[in-house]
Amino acid sequence: MKTPNFACFFDIDGVITQGPNFITVAKQAIQTLIQLKVPVVFVSNTCMLESDKAKQLSTVLGVTIQPDQVVLAQTPMRTLTDFHNKHVLVSGQDKAEDIGQMIGFKSITTIEKVCEAFPELDMVDHMHRVRLSEMIRSQGLVHDQNFRPIDAIVLLGEPIQWERSLQVIIDLLLTDGNPAIVPADSNTKRDHIPIIACNKDLVFKAAADLPRFGHGAFLTCLETLYKSISGNDLKYTAFVGKPFEISYQYAETIANKIALANGQPKIEKVYFIGDNPDVDIVGANMYNHLLKQAMNLRTSLSG
């Protein structure tokens, strides 16, 4: 059989799995491709440890999937090395700190830690208001004097407590990362600290009949609130995950590494299988357009 010179990229939710269940024909297809030594890469806007997702896929598909074959929403942040030594706030769920460290960020704080340093920021919880009032009466408003200002904000995924996260993130944007110092011109035209985000999916398909809110819904709330409060547009320093070029480019790099390890030629064609027209398909078509532009440029220069 001819050595394959192509790779296959697969979305996961809605393509490999549907809620807690796997799609039978997808399992058969993946097993066949791997038997034929076709480089297979899973490209998902899920945010979790690649090693955990690889274990899940291995169990579901009945074949061994390596963590390197999994490109999740945050994975391309490994290339953003200019930010890895900065003090960053990481927002997300579950293992958000672990994920941030795996990406390469060396100094991380969380919404919870900011609220510990500045207890007056979290006023959504009415019980917390009572505790705060008691604290102010007994000892005054106490701040952490060793709080290190935030240099950048990393948004990995939708948090559990949206209200608190939205409030604290906007506080940090309006105060250059240090709530202890409020600029006099916080509502005028000025740059905010860098924001790096991944996964702009407004909704995603799960077990429910209707789509569920994704990280894009949280980002929409953040953008709207920041605009309403400051009068300025929220600006992202970097955005990764589908449909952005960097995620497809990262996956192609992984596919070529797999091909090289198999003694196969460089990948000449990529097939992408996804279910979300606004993310998977738009992103794949955009990347295809960029590849064709690069090819045409090389042809014109060599001609």
Image (tube, rainbow, N blue to C red):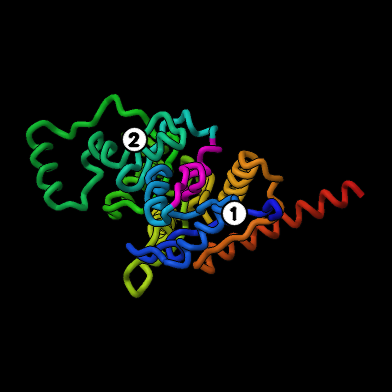
Q: Is residue 295 found left or right of 256 in the rendered image?
A: right
Relative to residue 101, is residue 244 depicted above or below? below
Q: Earlier in the sequence, mark 1 or mark 2?
A: 1
Q: Is residue 156 visible?
A: no
Mark 2 and mark 1 in contact (Cβ < 8 Å)?
no
Quadrant the N terminus occupies: bottom right
Mark 1: few, some, or many residues within 10 Å (few <14, many ≥20)?
few
The answer to which of 263 and 110 lies nearer the viewer is 263
* Residue positioned 47% across, 64% down in the render: 26
Residue wearing tag 1: 36
Q: Is residue 262 found left or right of 51 in the rendered image?
A: right
Where residue 28 appears, as percent x and y from the top left, is 48, 63
Where residue 168 appears, as percent x and y from the top left, is 32, 45
Instruction: Please state which of the two labelled residues, at mark 1 or mark 2, is closer to the viewer.
Output: 1
Q: Amino acid at mark 2?
A: Thr
Q: Which residues are magenta?
A: 63-80
Q: Is residue 164 visible?
A: yes
Please identify the residue farthest to the front as the structure is shown: 1
Mark 2: few, some, or many residues within 10 Å (few <14, many ≥20)?
some
Where residue 41 appears, as percent x and y from the top left, is 54, 51
Where residue 171 appears, as percent x and y from the top left, is 35, 44
Q: Is residue 71 rendered magenta in the image?
A: yes
Q: CA distance from mark 1 to mark 2?
A: 45 Å
Q: Is residue 263 rendered magenta in the image?
A: no
Residue wearing tag 2: 109
Helix, strand or loop at label 1? It is loop
* Residue positioned 33% across, 68% down in the render: 207
* Residue positioned 67% across, 53% down in the render: 4
